[in-house]
Image (cartoon, rainbow, N blue to C red):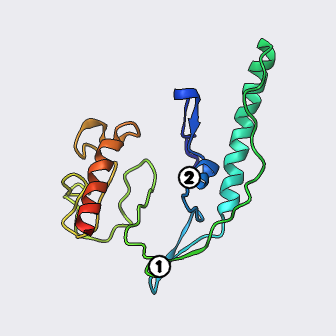
Amino acid sequence: MLGNPQTTGHGGGHDLNYRTLHASGVELVGRYLGGADDGKVHFGDDLAESIQAGDDLARAFMKWVQALCESRGLPVPWEVPPPPGFTGRTAVDLEGERISTVIWTAGYRPDYGWVHAPVFDDMGFPVQVDGRTEVSGLYFMGVHFQRKAQSAVLYGVGEDAELVARHIVETKR
């Protein structure tokens, strides 16, 4: 499954690719969760492959951009950068690194089969108020009609995320 590129032309253009996230201080890990034990979370050793797949898609799109620019006599506005010089870890020691909150993004379709907690209604949707569940520390984001009709879409999740983040910070004090 492939995701859509997270880009915008606003303010001269911005993106949210691997390089942008890394430069912003986000630690990237492999795509696959391998499990957790003894306070460590294990990830696949496939970050380089994920970056390569994203770059390959960018290069395919770039061919269209180049063709359009050439047909109009315009300079090509960007190039796919060379492979980055960073790698992802395959294990993270949550306690050793004093990590108390994990934000896990799992895609665009509601699939809660991996959550083994009694927090779902008869139709399989999370029972939550402003993202909080009855299980301490378990939150949901992007749930259809979590607070509003826009809660489950990319442009609308920010308002809900702010409430969840605020609650996490306030309960950690």
Question: Looking at the image, how many numbered discs can be counted on the residues?
Answer: 2
User: From what the image shows, is residue 91 above or below residue 166?
Assistant: below
Relative image position of residue 165 (x, y in whole percent): 31, 55
Type of amino acid at the residue the image marks with label 2: Ser
Which of the marked residues, 2 or 1, is nearer the chain's N terminus? Answer: 2
The residue tagged with tag 1: helix, strand or loop?
A: strand
- On residue 36, the disc is 1
Label 2 to label 1: alpha-carbon separation:
26 Å
Pointer 1 local density, CA inside 10 Å: few below 14, some 14–19, many at least 20:
few
Q: Specify the amino acid type for callout 1.
A: Ala
| Among the 4 quarters of the image, the one containing residue 71 | top right
* Residue found at the very far front of the displayed protein: 173
Residue on which the image places disc 2: 24
Q: What is the residue that sits farthest to the top in this orientation?
A: 72
Label 2 sits on a secondary structure element that is loop
Image coordinates of residue 95 in percent, x first then y, are 43, 81
Q: What quarter of the picture does the C terminus occupy?
A: bottom left
In the picture, residue 153 is in which quadrant? Answer: top left
* Residue 16 visible in the picture: yes
